[in-house]
Image: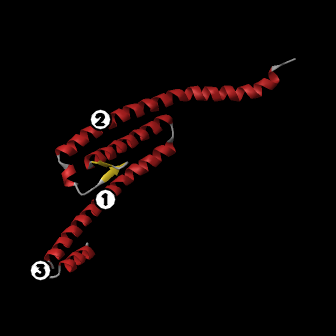
Amino acid sequence: MNNNLWTDPVAAPLLNAWAVFLAYIPRLLGAAIILLVGWFIASLVAKLFERLFLLLKTDSFLSRAHYTLHGTAVPPSRVLAKIIFWLLIVMFLIAAADAVGLPALSEFLRQVVSYIPNVFVAALILFISFELAGVVRGIIEGSLARGDKNAARISGTVAW
């Protein structure tokens, strides 16, 4: 009597799944190494950019921007450095997704990265518009300052 008749249909798929899992481990290790190296490089580059932003005095240039984290003020140079850090992490996530063999995740992250320049342009346009609005407000308040101060302030605020 053959005892393997009932074990073969059960054992074969399990052995096949185990073999696929074992073949997948090197990809997972490769992706983990890519992410660890990426985290190290992103941290290093972010620290370098934070120092560069401090040398360029971006904190004083962006002094009107108030960033808080848990009630604590965060300098704009650190915020910009964190943005660069996470952009680099996303780039390394793309490489890790490719290494693991997840093309859908990789393509999604590529689309996110390709959309980021649009966000920066929109932020730049917003920043320039706020600065121009401040200039127009100052011109209106200055030109109406000889008369009623409250009317000048209200007119400047409305123009802003």
Quadrant placement of the N terminus? top right
The percent position of residue 12, horizontal first and vertical second, equals 71, 26
Mark 3 surroundings within 10 Å by alpha-carbon count, few (fewer than 14), some (14 through 19), many (20 or more)? few
Quarter of the image with the C terminus in it = bottom left
Q: Secondary structure at mark 2?
A: helix
* Between discs 2 and 1, the one toward the N terminus: 2
Task: Answer above or below: position of 120 versus 152.
Answer: above
Picture coordinates of residue 18, whole percent (x, y): 63, 26
- Of the residues tagged 3 and 2, which is closer to the observer? 3
Q: How is the image coloured?
A: secondary structure
Judge whether 89 appears above or below 14 on screen.
below
At a point 33% along the width and 54% down the height, the residue shown is: 117
Which quadrant of the figure has residue 35? Answer: top left
- Most extreme residue toward the left, as rendered? 146
Instruction: State whether residue 36 is above or below residue 102.
Output: above
Crowding around mark 1 (Cα neighbors within 10 Å: few <14, some 14 to 19, many 20+) is few
Give the left or right position of residue 101, taking residue 127 as reference: right
Circle 2 residue:
44
Residue behind mark 1: 123
Q: Which of the 4 quarters of the picture holds residue 46?
A: top left
Q: Which residue is disc 3 drawn over?
A: 146
Which sits earlier in the primary sequence, circle 3 or circle 2? 2
